Amino acid sequence: MLFYSAFFALLIGLGPRIKQKLNLTQISTTGAIGILAAFQMIFFYRAYFLIGVAETTLISILGPILVLSFCPYFLKQKVSRKQWIALIIILICIIISELNFKL
């Protein structure tokens, strides 16, 4: 499975540039992304088995929210007021859906 994911990542990521001369860094970076994607899928399905579909989906949905929350501190990027408002609305929706799911 790891080989196929890395192979398809190479095809998709480097497909438009096949006619260009590719260096080893581009090929190895694309292959590493494919391998990491395969591990992500393995861990995702393992989490389904261990903690269930609802909790796994909730954790995967929280990924972009965590990135937006921590990017001002680690990446030194400015987060606009609209983005903070959207973040709060999304968190409220997730909390409401989890409360309805548990009832």
Image (cartoon, helix red, strand yellow):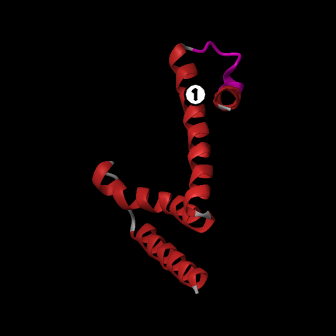
Q: Residue at x 57, y 39 (%)?
A: 39
Residue 31 counted in the magenta span: no
Residue 78 shows in the view: no
- For disc 1, the marked residue is 30
> Which residue range is magenta in the image?
14-22
Which structural element holds mark 1? helix
- Total marks shown come to 1
The x and y percentages for residue 48 are 61, 57
Residue type, numbered disc 1: Thr
Q: Residue furthest front?
A: 50
The x and y percentages for residue 78 are 34, 57
102 versus 5 height, above or below: below
Indicate left or right for 15 with 62 as reference. right
For the N terminus, which image quadrant? Answer: top right
The x and y percentages for residue 92 are 49, 79
Residue 95 shows in the view: yes
For the C terminus, which image quadrant? Answer: bottom right
The x and y percentages for residue 73 are 28, 54
Q: Nearer the viewer, residue 12 or 95?
A: 95
Q: Nearer the viewer, residue 38 or 9?
A: 38
Q: Residue at x 48, y 57 (%)?
A: 63
Quarter of the image for residue 2 reads top right
Crowd tier of the residue under label 1, counting other residues whose Cα lies within 10 Å: few below 14, some 14–19, many 20 or above: many
Q: Residue at x 60, y 32 (%)?
A: 34
Quarter of the image for residue 7 reads top right
Q: Nearer the viewer, residue 32 or 75?
A: 32
Q: Nearer the viewer, residue 52 or 44?
A: 52
79 versus 35 height, above or below: below
66 versus 93 height, above or below: above
Q: Residue at x 51, y 73 (%)?
A: 90
